[in-house]
Image (cartoon, rainbow, N blue to C red):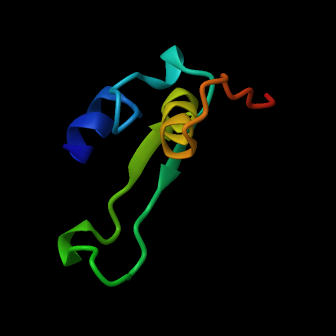
């Protein structure tokens, strides 16, 4: 899946939006931590600013929109 995303260009691993469709996109690479499958080490996951906002609201129970400074 990651290889397909890299072939198409970077896109959010959660919603599938491309870099051109969102304001910001961040990459994360899992470190050697307990519970992370060995085959995942070294592979990147990407998340866009809109998904970060959405999941933050879900976790905190916030009903107000979160404004992220640009």
Count of numbered marks: 0
Q: Residue furthest top?
A: 21
Quadrant (top left/top right/bottom left/bottom right) for the N terminus: top left
**Above-or-below relation of 22 to 61:** above
Left or right of 45 in this view: 48: right
Where is residue 57 shown, x and y percent of the image? 55, 35
Q: Nearer the viewer, residue 55 or 5?
A: 55
Residue 35 as seen in the image, left or right of residue 65: left
Residue 64 image-quadrant placement: top right
Residue drawn at x 54%, y 38% is 61
Q: Nearer the viewer, residue 33 or 54?
A: 54
* Left-right relation of 64 to 27: right
Q: Residue furthest right?
A: 69
The image position of residue 47, as x and y in percent, is 46, 40
- The x and y percentages for residue 31 are 42, 75
Residue toward you, 59 or 22: 59
Name the residue rendered at 21%, 37% in the picture.
4
Horizontal and vertical percent for residue 21? 50, 15
Residue plotted at (51% across, 17% down):
20
Tell me the quarter of the image containing the C terminus: top right
Residue in the picture at 43% in, 44% down = 46
């Amino acid at each position: 899946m990651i290889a397909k995303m890299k072939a198409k260009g970077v896109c959010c691993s959660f919603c599938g939006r491309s870099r051109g469709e969102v304001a910001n996109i961040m990459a994360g690479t899992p470190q050697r931590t307990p519970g992370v499958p060995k085959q995942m080490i070294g592979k990147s996951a990407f998340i866009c600013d809109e998904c970060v906002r959405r999941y933050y609201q879900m976790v905190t129970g916030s009903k107000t929109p979160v404004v992220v400074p640009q």
